[in-house]
Amino acid sequence: MTDYDAVERPGVNAGRLWASGLATAVVAALLAVVGILIARGVVDVAVLAPKGEGVWGNANTFTYAMLSGLAALLATGLMHLLILAVAAPRQFFTWIMVLATLIAVVLPLTLTVETGGKVATAVINLAIGLAITTILNSVAASAQTIRRPGARGDAPTRQWDQPPGTYYDS
């Protein structure tokens, strides 16, 4: 048995992780729509489109929701890669996602548009980023597996020294 064989190897229940990632994508897309509805309908702030587009907006609302879902799927891929490649994958995932969310929050604040629109977009981005980060970080714990040597077919083949039909006398 080599030293490598004695080391526990990380694994992932890919079906569970990606199903959770797909569910997270739906949550992120719906969160984008809810954020836009609140910003336009309740607070009366134009987000992503001129006010004349109405509460539901135009195709930009759909695009924003789909990009939010895509962000969740990309985050799922990142989590999958980190589980397989690094020590403490959830810690690295959290840091990467917090920094990516921070970029998504600060970016609209740098644009030369109405302050209300900037703040509303930043808040929606913050909510989406935090939702993706917390949901995927929590489901990763149940999708992460540890493959131990000798478990599920990993054990080396053992040879029996006795010829067939020979039994020990007890």
Image (cartoon, rainbow, N blue to C red):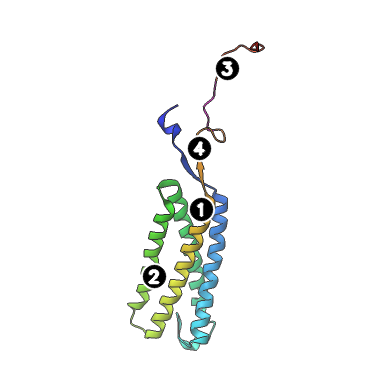
- Point 42% across, 52% down: residue: 89
Q: Which residue is mark 4?
A: 148
Q: Which residue is mark 2?
A: 104
- Point 50% across, 43% down: residue: 146
**Label 3: which secondary element:** loop
Q: Which residue is mark 3?
A: 160
Which region of the structure is painted magenta? Answer: 154-158
Which badge, 1 or 3, comes first in the chain's sequence?
1
The amino acid sitting under disc 4 is: Arg
Crowdedness of circle 1 by 10 Å Cα count: few (<14), some, many (20+)? Answer: some
The amino acid sitting under disc 1 is: Ala
The relative height of residue 1 versus residue 152 in the rendered view (above or below) is above
Which badge, 2 or 3, comes first in the chain's sequence?
2
Q: Do tag 1 and tag 4 residues touch (Cβ < 8 Å)?
A: no
Which badge, 2 or 1, comes first in the chain's sequence?
2
The amino acid sitting under disc 3 is: Trp
Q: How many marks?
A: 4
Which badge, 4 or 3, comes first in the chain's sequence?
4
What is the number of the mark on residue 141?
Answer: 1
Q: Position of residue 129 (x, y in %)?
A: 45, 67
The relative height of residue 167 versus residue 21 in the rendered view (above or below) is above
Which badge, 4 or 2, comes first in the chain's sequence?
2
Q: Nearer the viewer, mark 2 or mark 3?
A: 3
